Amino acid sequence: MIRLSLALAKVGGLFVVFAAVLGGMALVTGAGVLVDSAFRAQPPLRLAGADVVVSARQSIPRKEDLPVALPERARLPLSLVATVSGVPGVAHAVGDLSFPAAALSGTAGRTGDPATAGHGWSSLAMSGRITAGRAPRTPDEIAVSGGKVGQRLQVMAAGRSGTYRVTAVVDAPGVYFTDAVAVTLADRAGGAVDLVAVRAAAGVDPGALAQKVAGRLGAGPTGGYEVSTGRDRADAESPGAAASRGLLLILPGSIGGISLMVVGFVVGGGLALSVNRQRRDLALIRAAGATPRQVRRIVTVQAVAAALPAALPGAALGYLLAARFGDLLTGVGLLRADQSLAYGPLPAVAATLLLLGVVRVAAWAAALRISRMPVIAGLPEPRTPSKVRTNAGLLIMLASLVLATLPLFVRTESAAVGPATSAILAVIGLALAGPWLIQQLTGALARSRLMARAPGPIWLAVNNSHGYALRTAGAVAALGMTLTLGLSVALTQTTIATAQSAQAAEGMRGLVTITAHELGGIPHDLLTDVRATTKATAVTMTTVATEPLLLGDDPGLMSRPAMALGPDAEGLIDLDIAAGSLARLTGDAVAVDEKAGRVGEHLDVIMGDGAKVRARVVATYRRGLGFGPIVVSRDLASAHTTTGLDSAILARPADVADLGALARRPGITLASTPDGPQHAATSAQSLVNFAVLAVLMGYVLVAVANRLVATTTARREEFAGLRRTGAAPRQLRRMVRWEALLVGAGASVAGLALCAVPLGLLGIGFLGRPLPAGPLWLAPVSVAGVMLIVCLAMEVPARKIIH
Amino acid sequence: MSAVVSLERVRKTYGEVTALDHVSLDFPRGRFVAVMGPSGSGKTTLLQCAAGLEPPDSGQVLIGGADVTRLSETKRTELRRKHIGFVFQSYNLLPTVSIEDNITLPLRLAGRRPDRAWLDELVGRMGLRERLRHRPAELSGGQQQRAAIVRALVARPDVVFADEPTGALDLRNAIRVLDVLRGLVDELGQTVVMVTHDPAAAARAHDTLVMADGKVIDTLAAPTADELAVRLAHLAAEPVA
């Protein structure tokens, strides 16, 4: 059976399957590496000397969903250090602290993230060794990983500038202060530590010890503490990293659906082509007594035979793709530089299984019709599209229009789901109803007066497109799909981003943003200094989790970045207040989007470190798109951030030059065109989306071109017949060019039409005009690209077989 | 009688096989000529060279006085369109368009308007008047072949070449098609050259050329089917060196 299947196979069609699977393997393996990395990647471990690390719980579990990550450090009571020390098998336990520290002059060697570079000396027992000098003893002594003993360094520690003398060089990253200074700087006079690092006594198994510690602390799945060993220690060290790894899961999740659908489309198209070419042979086999099941098996065997050789090179491509993608994610700051991807065999194996599944289903579907045909001699007629298929397609396209109205009701980033889902549905509808639509349109064209007088090649092109509606529609649907998906995803992003930054820009008109990322946050005295010159307010960026606030939010708990403002923001930053006032933003207070609540209500908020707060709503505002649906008070935020420092200062100087002296301070950055707080995240996200989209679209275009080449090459007989009927080679080439134009035009019209409605509605909802935000040249350029690809893919092979 | 198509010392080889071995031949106007011979004798190659479909390796092919071997592919196509009509065993109709569109396709390709009276005459003669709006698949094999004959004649060619025109037809339809071809010659003065291996079909022609090993070895005027059958049986029996 297998030998028969392979003997029957026509190389052309199966090559299309091979190429489709090759690309599909690359995409799915690439996405798989990201997912795998989310679970397995090993971030660098600072407390490498600790066998067990105790931390607070940095996530909130959700039912049947990924837990909500809490990126701000939750603290542990100091008493825990003593409790853990008392557990049998513990050799040594240290309370570890992290706080912002950065050298303003000279170098302090490796420090890692400045927001958490400062530590107490006792932490070194778990993170490294002293290589030169002696331990810091007085408040102005420090140890660093670079520099020289005896050197004096200007250090910004926890927002306070000071001069310190280096007394030791150590082999661990960070800046080490005496424990007393660390407690003061980290503001832990009340007694709290970030982590308890535990070294096991000789011969004690870390896993067993962790269980004992957990038992003593009452930790566990429901307890308040996490007890980590092995690679989990790194997550305990940096809750932000765990949250950023969550992104690795979400990204491929969101693109994975589209990718698999696209791969399915392309593989299915290739198989349909391959089956079509064997119609005569398969009909013969049926006549010779093969059952429909056997015919389907023949097709499946061929498909799998074409797919298997593609698995290995495809997977290799996938690993390369993932590496490039990892670089991109790091480049835009979505992935920490120290967070390397994990390259295991699992993604390749999973992708192979997934793709083989897709190929088998596609083969079954492609062979279904021909295998059930009654046994008749001769070539089957050109197929007519079935009514059920057409009606289903038209219905799905209609449904996509309904979804497209979502942006009229939802004015948050979630509205992007509308056009995106609408585009996917529309594309499926087009693939189903396409043949019928093509038949009707080209039929009308063929019967029109225009055609009665048309030159032979054009007349033939129109009639071929009409007569082989399925063949034409396959190409039209695939190319229309790239246009619709590409344009709607890209322009949805830009439209929402434009609307966001437009709102943010209005709200922050005339403001200058001062940031100090290199110092881990805004130094304490900076706000006072800025205020000496001009009116200013500090802003803290944090993360809060709430029940759904707006339509389109995650139905369970939803975490999102939020801005924290104080009463001094009133009159500086304009949120377009609907009720209440920012001046009342003190204590446990929040302001929310006017659609999310009312002044005087209470709102349960979980802060970034997991603290639960019942906050009063003191103001509602209209610029929720630019500033997010919730703004918390700075009083509330400052107690629940890792650094305890503000993220930025917003000032309104009469002249930017007034702030010149401040801008020259080391580590301070001034931006006179302020972006909204959502901006950085949105633009990074959209860059990633663009990159993914480009790869995906490239894959589809190559696959479609490949398929067009194969279908055109298969028309040798048809061309020979036309030549004998009196067609000159030049006329056949013209005919093929016109067919290419028809396919390209059909794809362009369908692609643009299907994304026009959702994008128009999105434009009305977000920008108040029936057009999405630019770059609108994307549309003509994509159309031109599609046209070029179709013409090349059809004309070049046609030239070869018309001699 | 002037020759419509003339071959002079035409030679055509496919690799090691000599399909036409220096053949010189005139096809006279207004005659129905059959070409017979065993498989591989070169009869289809003769037809393709005479029709200007295949350029010969050496020698001359004159169609309407022009040497087709010296023309470009496009010029050859234009010459064929003007002077030559084709009928094939497998009809060669486009499955996706109507019979009428199929019939007028050569004119469309030549950029000419159909001569309605001539078209009507041909369609009536072939009994296809009710079938013009149908697709080829909706017609019987005989009807499809008669449509192909109309298509071959619609541009008023000097000569119609038919390659096994009855090969795919049953006896009744085959006879009808042969009658039609003979009628074209006798009543309309057409010239028809037909390749066949069926002695009964060849017997409907005025003259029969017998080919073997790339050469015309015999020309028979109005032979009977039995005579032809005997002649062919001899050829099959004695392998020619």
Image (cartoon, coloured by chain):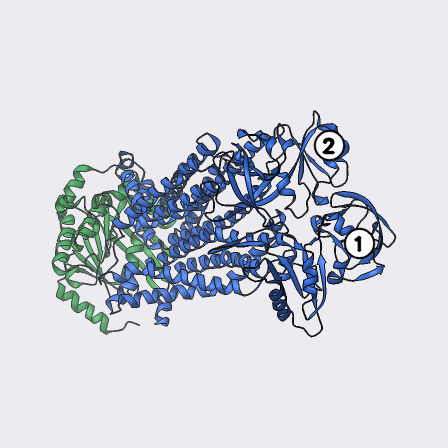
Chain colours: A blue, B green
Could you tell me if residue A459 is visible in this image?
A: yes
Identify the residue position indicated by label 2 in the image: A530
N-terminal-most mark, 2 or 1? 1
Residue at 19 percent across and 70 percent down: it is B233
Mark 1 belongs to chain: A
Which x, y percent locates residue A610?
58, 50
Mark 1 Cα shell of 10 Å, populated few (<14), some (14-19), many (≥20)? many
Position of residue A321 relative to residue A426, above or below, is below
Residue drawn at (45%, 33%) of the image = A765
Query: Closer to the camera, B38 or A13?
Result: A13
Residues behind callouts 2 and 1 on a single chain: yes
The amino acid type found where label 2 is placed reads: Val
On the image, the x and y values in percent for residue A367 come to: 32, 61
State the image coordinates of residue A425 (x, y, percent, origin top left): 38, 46
Tag 1: residue type? Thr
Judge whether A673 appears above or below A29 on screen. Answer: above
Compare residues A598 and B128 and report the one nearer the observer: A598
Secondary structure under the numbered disc 1 in the rendered image: loop
Residue to which mark 1 is pinned: A178
* Residue B64 in view: no
Instruction: Identify the secondary structure beneath mark 2.
Output: helix
Res A237 quadrant in image: bottom right
Q: Residue A495 carries which label?
A: none
| Horizontal side of residue A171 vs A390, given as left or right | right
